[in-house]
Structure formats: structure tokens, C-alpha cells
Amino acid sequence: MSMSWVLALTYNAVLLSVGGYAWVRGGRPERIGAAINIAASFATGALQLIDRRHYAPAEAIVLGIDVVVAISFYWLAIRTTRFWPIWAFGFALANLIMTVAALLLPGVSLFAYHSGLSAYAYLALGALLLGAWRMPPGADDVLKNGSRRAWFAKEKLREHSQLNSNV
């Protein structure tokens, strides 16, 4: 078995472990983050298994998947009360910058390019893992939902009940 297969299997094991942990332990944002990571990783992996040209820097379909990942984490970061999606968005953005840099600098070795992408993928998984790990075991429904709207509604209700109790 070649080293590339060992690295791919290791990444997939980490991906599925972190995604499963986030699904079980985390709330709605962590489940969305796990789905983003798993879907993008398997879509990219499937493309690369089908045709080796998808390993090239800035290959259109893979670049499109990376753009969708960055947009998805941005959307999640602005919609949730969690902090980890901001980090995941930053790592996805760094991934895009590295892809563009590899396109503009054709002398970059393929190994260096893919090593950088792997580093950002592991960092995004680390952010997801920390986000799921920080979820308290007895979290209420609003905290598990993670929505800014639900949180603001809860705060408004709490303020309203405090005003009524002070009267």
C-alpha cells in the first residue's frame, strides 16, 4: 500500500470520527459543519479517484467545491452563535488563497500544494471538533439550535419576564 493511500485512509478516518462526534455531541451548527466537511471531502475524493487531473491546482470542479465550502462556512458563521465556524471559514479561505497561489506560481510542487490543503482541512476539522466538544452535555434547545434568532428571542423573553417581575 502506497503512502498516499495511507494518508487518504487516515484523513477519512479522522473526517468520519470528527463528523460522527460532532453529529452526536454537537448541536445544529456542528451537524451542518460535519455535513459540509464530509460532503466536500467525499465529492473531491470521488472526483480524484475517477480522474487524476482533478489533483491539479485550481482544477475547476474542485475549485468550485472549495468555493461552496467557504461560502457555506461563511453562511454558518453569520447565522450561528458559535465561534468555530469563523475559524472554519478562515481555513476554507486560506485553502482558496493557496489554490490561487498554486495556479499563479506553476513552480509549486504538487506535494507542497496538497500538503497545504491537507493542513487546512485538518485545521477546519479541529475547529469543528472543539466546537462540538464545548457543547455542554445538558444544553437547552436554544443552545443546541445555535441560531442567532432563537438566542435573541430567548434574551428578549428573559428581559420581558424580568421587567414583569420588577413591577
Image (tube, helix red, strand yellow):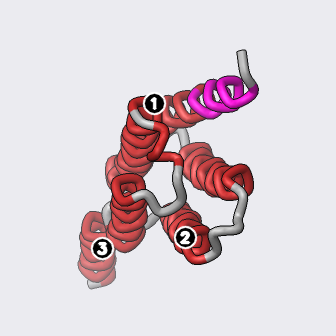
Does the stretch in magenta take in 45? Answer: no
Residue 16 is labelled as none
- Segment tinted magenta in the rendering: 3-12
Q: CA distance from mark 3 to mark 2?
A: 44 Å
Classify mark 2: helix, strand or loop: helix
Q: Which residue is mark 2?
A: 103
> Can residue 83 be seen in the rendering of this structure?
no
Q: Quadrant of residue 112?
A: bottom right
Q: CA distance from mark 3 to mark 1?
A: 46 Å
Q: What amino acid is at disc 3?
A: Phe
Q: Amino acid at mark 1?
A: Leu
Kindly indicate whether the residue at mark 1 contacts the one at mark 3 (C-beta within 8 angstroms).
no
Which three-letter amino acid code belongs to the residue tagged 2?
Leu
Give the camera-side residue of 6 and 37. Answer: 6
Give the answer, above or below, for where 128 lies relative to 80: above
Residue assigned mark 1: 49
User: Tag 1's secondary structure?
Assistant: helix
Give the structural element (helix, strand or loop) at label 3. helix
